[in-house]
Amino acid sequence: MSVQERKERERAGRERLILATARELAEQQGWDAVTTRRLAERIEYSQPVLYSHFRGKREIIGAVALEGAAEMAVALRTAASAADGPRARVAALARVYLDFAERNPAVYEAMFQLDGGLAFAQEETPEPLKDAFAALLENLGEAAGDGVHPALFTEVFWAALHGLATLTRAGRLPPGDAERRVELLVDRLAML
């Protein structure tokens, strides 16, 4: 292994450590607790080392969002591939999406609520975000129905899931009806 390869591997390891620590701190105490000073202390590197990887908190949030999008895409595809038939696939997508948001609230917040400097629904949208949307789109085309553009249907489905996730997390919806909401969404929106 060359010196350059070793340095690149060490740099990648530091970057993974920074992001893992940011995620852990955000999940435990919220994103307000994630500061470059606290991260530097926790990972036992100086702030300049941290800044050599990320220009600041906004870039860290963006990197966490991209990791989360990649994780969500895998989870969505795994759930869809295990489902038997279009209705079961749509229901599995909804459950996995909502479960991801519930189990990873800080990551979900970085993905969809905080400014991580990422472009959405544009040509320059980062690939992990496009792929997470594609994981929904590729499994919802059949559910869209005749005369409905699959991407538009996917956007509405995603918006409904995001609304459920956000309102549930904020305590605005009664906790006992989560499964009934998924069933209603699948039955009415997907018309399956």
Image (cartoon, helix red, strand yellow):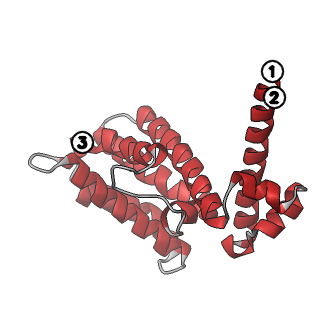
Tell me which amino acid carries mark 3.
Gly
Residue 37 lies, in percent from the top left, at 82, 69
Of mark 3 and mark 2, the one earlier in the sequence is: 2
- Relative to 104, residue 67 above or below: above
In the current view of this chain or complex, which residue is farthest to the left?
147
Label 3, residues with CA under 10 Å away: few <14, some 14-19, many ≥20: some
Amino acid at circle 2: Arg
Q: Which residue is mark 3?
A: 141
Under circle 1, the secondary element is: loop
Instruction: Name the residue beneath numbered marker 2.
Output: 6
Q: Are marks 3 and 1 in contact (CB under 8 Å)?
A: no
Name the residue nearer the viewer: 100 or 128.
128
- The amino acid type of the residue labelled 1 equals Ser
Disc 1 vs disc 2: Cβ atoms closer than 8 Å?
yes
60 and 181: which is toward the camera? 60
Q: Residue at x 74, y 53 (%)?
A: 52
Residue 8 location (% of width, % of height): 75, 34
Work out whether residue 185 or residue 2 is closer to the camera in this orientation and state it.
2
173 or 116, which is in the foreground? 116
Number of the label disc, if any, that sits on residue 2: 1
The secondary structure type at the circle numbered 2 is: helix
Q: Residues within 10 Å of mark 2 (few under 14, many from 20)?
A: few
User: Horizontally, is 124 left or right of 142 in the view?
Assistant: right
Residue depicted at 21% across the width and 53% down the height: 191
Q: Left or right: 72 with respect to 143?
A: right
